[in-house]
Image: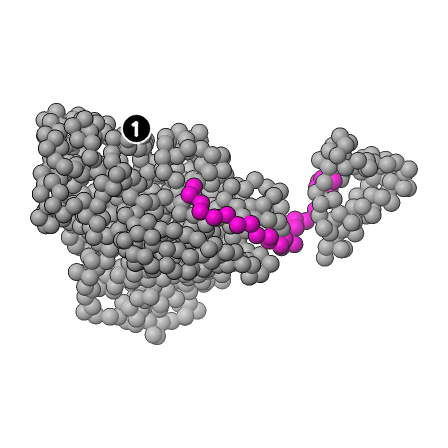
Amino acid sequence: MDGSDMPAVRDLTLEERASLTSGADPWHMQGIEERNIPECMITDGPHGLRKAVASRSGDISESVPATCFPPAAGLSSAWDPDLVRRVGEALGEECIQEKVAVLLGPGVNIKRNPLGGRCFEYWSEDPYLAGHEAIGIVEGVQSKGVGTSLKHFAVNNQETDRLRVSANVSERALREIYLPAFEHIVTKGRPWTVMCSYNRINGVFSSQNRWLLTDLLRGEWGYDGIVMSDWGACHDRVAALAAGQNLEMPPTGTDGEIVEAVNAGRLDPAQLDRMAQGIIDLVDRTGPAMAIDGYRYDVDAHDALAREAAAESIVLLKNDHGILPLAPDADIAVIGEFARTPRYQGGGSSHLTPNRVTSLLDAMRSRGSAMTFAPGFTLDDDAQDPALAEQAVAAARDAQTVVLCMGLPEQAEIEGRDRTDFALPAKQIAVLEAVAAVNPNIVVVLSNGSAVAMDPWRDKAAAILEGWLLGQAGGAATADVLYGDVNPGGRLSQTIPLRIEDDPSMTIWPGENRQSDYGEDIFVGYRYYDTFDRPVAYPFGFGLSYASFGIDRVRVERTGPRSVRVSMTVTNVSDRDGAETVQIYVTPGPSSVRRPVHELRGFAKVRLAAGESREIGIDLDSRAFAYWSVPAGGWKVEGGVYGIEVGVSSRDIVARIPVEIEDDGVAAALDEWSTYGEWRDDPVGGPVLDRVLGEAMAETGRSLVPTDEHSAMMIFLRQTPVTGIAGYLGKRGPGFLERLMREYRGVRS
């Protein structure tokens, strides 16, 4: 069925409307055959299609083969929205072949702490980067007529106690850190579905949070798609429907509760109609793509795209003495079980069956490289086998260069559990130390879904490739980078701290007694490390290249009262083709609130041939200069001189240019508990206060305001609420307050 003669919700019975708001089984939306509403399949897949073989059951142990693209931990390091969109288009094509109407992803929750067990599925510690990259998945998949499900909405930043924990976070941190990636994708990419998270937000389950699902998502952001629950996240269907959740997954067989609630007047029938109509609209949207029969995607082309995406995701962190790229005829010792048994995806609901897998060992052998291999260690928790270490040392002793593959085994990073250790397994580090004792020419290749400790072992490596998780073609892509066929262009999407104890959330991570307090507030990742000048192993946005680049002729032009265009010339000053990632940070001027020292507000990946120059421009709108004002209940741009920083990481800034930005005039409403200083500084309230207080002092003969603006009395007065000032006016005090508020409201309105 193509959905062309889909009924309207008014044509359905109450029971049928209720049935549409719950699934038919764990992987299908409920259909009504006699009403021409087909069932639609929903499947996991942030980075690849995980369609269960037994699609009518909850068994996810087997899935149909699909292309495993790099998970977000890797792909985010590409800093390439166009590449991400092409991956999304390929995912959409695979959905068409497998008759999947909605792909569950992308996940854009913030990497609040590197130990988060699901960091491998998320994009960044920075909401701007997360939103502007992950939107490519949404746009790419949906360009093929298949829906996406933006998740997990919202503040799902840990796996510990995730089904019930309350993420207790300030309004400002919500707006500046945890919601902007969702906001950008919802308002610009228009995902067809959004998946609410398991957790509570400030005490309220996401699935029952009307402010989140209706007031914010649909009201403020203008969302017109459906909201589905994460699997098992709906605890009260009546409350969830009232809050704005369209679809419960998987079904709990509680349709009767909805019918009863409507008949009893506990659920507005119009709200049920809105939620059920959303399901019909989604089925209608996906109908044309699901009506395509016999479609087959190009498996080889998708594998080639996976290889390209993996190569772009690799970050070169260290390259002493130009040890990389490897010479084609170099004598190599490849050490580490990861080279033979690649770790290319995370564990849990995103774990899929790949079409094919290429290991690094196979990729290097296919090149005819002169090499020996030693596994070095096992990927389990067993104690180190001395014989494996001895084989590794023997292989390394006679080699020109050692490629040592290290990382986190899959059981260390899996949905449902946070990591408890920041370090790599001790036996891997012991092998590195033993090998370094006989051969200093070590290239470490890492496989991990989130940051790991690199001190003190990084000093024993001549080069480090951060491979994150690279999908099914990661082995071939890594060989491409090692031998220089591809110039590494990846940049870190998360800071790598020296120690996990340095992370600002660690004093309260991951919470206790069903509460997780976000006490670091807006100071997440580089916003903390850079503001407070904390040393890190590698900063946000960092990455090396085999090429060299220059950035000059940086200019900042105002395009409006609160918008600018940043222009510059980027030049490849080397004899190798490559790409530079230009990053734009904004530093605030004098502010009435705490703000990070700078924040990412724009970026561009610029591909240049050897010796090529190109002028680029990046536009910043008013949001680039704004913070969330809690008193005003909205975004606020304070007037003043801001700094525009052009850099290649958050700590490698090549140019800083000041720019004058005009105040937006947004001001919080004053009241009796606003201080004298707040009244005086307010452009509307200040003149009113001066006039009303001046007249009141004249009537009482009391002079409360000192002439010296810097006196101790003035310091005291500026912190005093005006209701307290009224007390000094005796019997005239109540009249003063009443008149002050009346005249202020009259002028402000």
- Residue that appears at 28% across and 68% down: 289
Q: Position of residue 439 (x, y in %)?
A: 17, 31
| Residue nearest the observer in this picture, 259 or 553 | 553
Query: Residue 123 in magenta?
Result: no
Residue flagged by tag 1: what amino acid is it? Pro
> Where's the C terminus, which quadrant?
bottom right
Q: For numbered disc 1, what is the local secondary structure?
A: loop
Query: Residue 659 in magenta?
Result: yes
Query: What colour scheme does the image use?
Result: one colour
| Residue nearest the observer in this picture, 440 or 312 | 440
**Is residue 235 among the parts visible in the rendering?**
no
> Where's the N terminus, which quadrant?
bottom left
- Residue that appears at 34% across and 54% down: 572
In the rendered structure, which segment of residues is drawn in magenta?
A: 651-676
**Is residue 403 among the parts visible in the rendering?**
yes
Q: Position of residue 181 (x, y in %)?
A: 43, 51
Q: Position of residue 348 (x, y in %)?
A: 27, 44
- Residue that appears at 72% across and 50% down: 683
Q: Is residue 188 above or below residue 76?
A: below
Residue lying at the far bottom of the rendered structure: 5
- Image quadrant in which you'd find residue 43: bottom left
Q: Is residue 391 above or below residue 84?
A: above
| Residue nearest the observer in this picture, 429 or 28 | 429
The residue that label 1 is drawn on is: 456
**Badge 1 density bin: few <14, some 14–19, many ≥20, Cα 10 Å:** few
Q: Position of residue 638 (x, y in %)?
A: 61, 49
| Residue nearest the observer in this picture, 463 or 303 | 463
